[in-house]
Each structure stands twice: as C-alpha cells, then as structure tokens.
Image: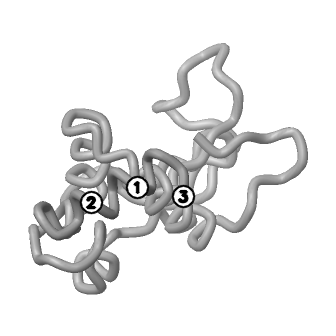
C-alpha cells in the first residue's frame, strides 16, 4: 500500500469524505450537487465556447493570443465550490472528480489538446 493510501486509510475514520459543495458525508461530490452542475451548451463562440444567443466564430469575450478553449460548466454554484475546495482547501481528490465530470460533459480531449 502506498504511503498516501495508507495515510488516507488511517485518517478516513477520523475525517470521513464529504461533498465539497453541501458537506453531506459520503463522497467528494454528492449526486444532488453533481446534477446541479450547469453545463455550457451551444450556441456560443466557436473559439472560446462562451455562451451566446447565436453561434459566432469569435466573440467579444475572446482574449487575443490565447488558444481555443472550452469550459464544461458555468463557473457558479457547485462548480465554483468544487474549484475553490480543490484549490483553496487543497482537496486534491476533487481534481479527479472535476476531470471525470469534464470528460463526461465534453468527451475526451482531441489529439493535441489538453484537459486542464
């Protein structure tokens, strides 16, 4: 058993896993909060994925010089809480949760692109 796994197995009874959004014990993201993630859906900007009322090759929100990018979820509510818990409270397990949710929403990244 690797050291992080050993430490986690010793600490789990003392600090059980809980939802990063609503604090319900059980998992890093409970089913109710998972459903509450608001996906970014078309139509929108073909370059940055920003939501717009109609499709656009490039929108006003695009920053010059940046490569194309996509967001899976609107950054509010549960998504903001997940990112905050991962970054500010160092809940590293949430990186795996967010990656899985992002791939589930957008599919795996195309060749030559990276999931961040």
Q: Nearer the viewer, residue 115 or 87?
A: 87
> In the rendering, at what x and y percent does residue 21 appear?
17, 63
Tell me if I can see residue 61 in this picture: yes
> In the rendering, at what x and y percent does residue 27 appear?
28, 74
The tag earlier along the polypeptide, 1 or 3, is 3
Q: Regarding mark 2 in the picture, which secondary structure is present there?
A: helix
Along the horizontal axis of the image, is 79 left or right of 108? left
Q: Residue at x 31, y 44 (%)?
A: 86
The tag earlier along the polypeptide, 3 or 2, is 3
Along the horizontal axis of the image, is 96 left or right of 109? left
**CB contact under 8 Å: marks 1 and 3:** yes
> In the rendering, at what x and y percent does residue 30 appear?
26, 79
Q: Nearer the viewer, residue 33 or 10?
A: 10
Along the horizontal axis of the image, is 6 left or right of 101? left
Quarter placement of the N terminus: bottom right
Q: Quadrant of residue 37?
A: bottom left
Quarter placement of the C terminus: top right
The residue at which mark 2 appears reads as 10
Depicted 22 relative to depicted 84: above or below? below
The residue at which mark 1 appears reads as 6
Q: Residue at x 28, y 38 (%)?
A: 90
Give the number of the disc on residue 1: 3
Mark 1 closeness class: few <14, some 14–19, many ≥20 residues within 10 Å = few
> In the rendering, at what x and y percent does residue 73 appear?
42, 59
Q: Regarding mark 1 in the picture, which secondary structure is present there?
A: helix
Q: Residue at x 20, y 53 (%)?
A: 81
**CB contact under 8 Å: marks 2 and 1:** yes
Q: Nearer the viewer, residue 1 or 103?
A: 1
Q: Residue at x 51, y 50 (%)?
A: 71
Hey, which residue is sitting farthest top in the picture? 65
Depicted 10 relative to depicted 4: above or below? below
Query: How did the renderer colour the structure?
Result: one colour
């Amino acid at each position: 058993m690797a050291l992080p796994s050993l430490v986690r197995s010793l600490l789990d009874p003392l600090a059980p896993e809980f939802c990063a959004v609503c604090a319900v014990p059980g998992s890093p993201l409970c089913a109710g909060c998972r459903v509450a993630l608001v996906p970014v859906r078309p139509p929108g900007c073909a370059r940055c994925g920003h939501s717009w009322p109609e499709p656009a090759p490039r929108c006003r929100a695009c920053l010059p010089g940046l490569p194309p990018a996509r967001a899976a979820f609107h950054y509010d509510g549960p998504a903001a809480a997940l990112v905050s818990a991962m970054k500010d409270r160092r809940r590293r397990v949430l990186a795996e949760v967010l990656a899985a949710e992002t791939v589930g929403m957008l599919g795996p990244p195309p060749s030559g692109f990276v999931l961040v």
